[in-house]
Image: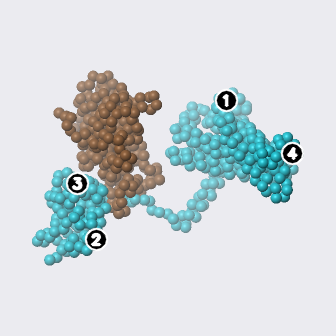
Amino acid sequence: MATDDMEHVIRVRGLKTAFGRHVVHDGLDLDVRKGEILGVVGGSGSGKSVLLRTIIGLNRPVAGEIEVLGQNIGKLEESEFRTLATRWGVLFQFGALFSSLTVAQNVQVPIREHLKLPQTLMDEIASYKISMVGLPPEAGAKFPAELSGGMRKRAGLARALALDPEILFLDEPTSGLDPIGAAAFDRLIRQLRDALGLTVFLVTHDLDTLNAVCDRIAVLAEKHVIVVGTMEDMLQQEHPWVRDYFHGPRARAARASVEQGR
Amino acid sequence: MVWCIGSLEQQGEAFVQQPVLSDAAPIQVEQHEGVCVIRATGAWTIDTSATVAQVLNRLSPAADQTVQIDLDGLSALDTTGAWLLYRLKRDLRYAGFSVSFVNVRESYGALIEAVAQHDAPCPISPPAEHSLICQIEDLGRGTVRAFQSLMDLVGYTGLVVAAFARVIANPRRMRWASLVHHLEHVGLKAMPIVGLMSLLIGVVIAQQGEFQLRRFGGEYFVVDLLGISILREIGILLTAIMVAGRSGSAFTAQIGTMMLNEEVDAIRTLGIDPVETLVLPRVLALIIMLPALTFYSDIVALLGGGLFAWLSLDISPGAFIRRLNDAITLDTFLVGMYKAPFFAAVIAIAGCFEGMRVRGGAESVGEHTTRSVVESIFLVIVLDAMFAVFFSTIGM
């Protein structure tokens, strides 16, 4: 049974975000435990990505507290925030690679920015990170424009992992990938979590990802997190949106495929 | 006693000079009966990796022995530390040592194992091409591309003219709403900035002209200078350049973005001609508005010059107008105005043309916007030179 005394790496309390008069979140609470993979789901426009962006400090909340790795995001000095930011990695929806740099140089950007390492060591680090995310060695010298969507996401992941972060934020990691690529990416996320001991916060629409990867699921609706729990918990829920989401034909198909896989 | 590896004692002097390596040295080397023990201590993470790598570089194999890498003293390990440990073991093994890790915590072992599977050196950047041959090749390609692009522009102009002819034949095909929208954006909304620029230019010409002409005692010729230079050249040229920067670039960015969103493709699949819907209203709007803006710019620039003449030279407005009337003819004014629709067509067509050539990503929009502005200003100035020859030949 999950208890509250587990270590929380992210704690969100009473979060309110708004763009002008449009309120996105109101009174949102969420905890992410150390070492888990938490999937955030919700309808289009329910503010999943906004929540992610707010936690990593790209959006300023109107009210509420966000604690990441024990530090209150809103109360940090600029320099303290930058130090904290090196302890998480972010994969944006389309990779967000720097187009003027090669993949390997992209991976080295955060290292170059925050540390002073010998070039050979940086090249070695870039090499094993690129291999870790499942890219072939040739990809290192390629520019983002020469890569497919799936490879771009893997490269973005390698950059997110460059500084050995404790938390990994993934924004729709499997969107735009074909089913084979998406399944491979799901496996990759799990492997990396197991190997590196990461905590993963991922925003997704993909029911297969939820089934295959996530330890817990948080459902975002009506401007806050209406329920958090395992897949089994979700199936018991009576809330109409949650029912429609997890009992729809696509959800059944996704579950069946996972059970077959087992 | 034979050391398998250069020890701290052996390299004592070198180490003493580096305080980080004394107490907090990330490795210690010990010798036990033919077995060399390397103790990794402290945190081996990306933050300490520079120091660790430096110390590891100084280890130099001396003899064929068994090496144990003891991880008992490790307080923290991440993938970079794991990579360094793995690399140490790999390199010692290549050098002929029998190497093993001892006292490995389970989590550390898994991490080292995970990194070890990914020992696949990758190239960092593509091979550089800076040879002379490459540069000559680039020059050749660039020249060919420039000519091709000019030919395409001519072809595109034909396309626009053909669309215009179709619309003339069947005026109901004209997009009036779009035309009015662009008339407002390229004309009305450009008035403040064109006005301000013209006023200042008028003042500057009057001030500089007066300063130079005074030396010959001819400061009253300032009015002639203002009238002729502004009406013939400066009014139209500056307005055209301003409009190229303001509206030509906007055309490229708008159409370019629509290209990226596949909106232009959607227009085509719906059986609508994109040149008719997107390009023609923009071209016509600019052809109508650039002469109007030029007229406005002429007036404001003369106003600025006249104001300066009045305040600084005591030429009263009445005297200014009389003098201006003697200095210029209707032709002086018309020479400037005749050029305006041609410049407008060049700016608008170049802007739309570059917009339609956007491919790939947002970067391409920026690249083509720059090109459209450079191209249209360049063509405007070439055209202006041709007009100058033409008008002087026919005696205007």
Q: Chain of mark 2?
A: B
Three-letter amino acid code at disc 2? Gln
Sequence-wise, the earlier of marks 2 and 1 is 2
Alpha carbon of mark 4 to alpha carbon of mark 2: how far?
87 Å
How dense is the environment of label 3, judged by Cα within 10 Å: few (below 14), some, or many (20 and up)? few
Spot occupied by residue B172 in the image (x, y as percentages of width and height): 69, 27
Sequence-wise, the earlier of marks 3 and 4 is 3
Q: Is residue B229 left or right of residue A211?
A: right
Q: Are marks 4 and 2 in contact (CB under 8 Å)?
A: no
Q: Which residue is mark 1?
A: B176
Q: What chain is colored cyan?
A: B
Q: Which residue is mark 3?
A: B76
Q: Nearer the viewer, mark 4 or mark 1?
A: 4
Q: Is label 4 in a helix, a strand or a loop? A: helix
Q: Is label 2 in a helix, a strand or a loop? A: loop
Q: Chain of mark 4?
A: B
Sequence-wise, the earlier of marks 3 and 2 is 2
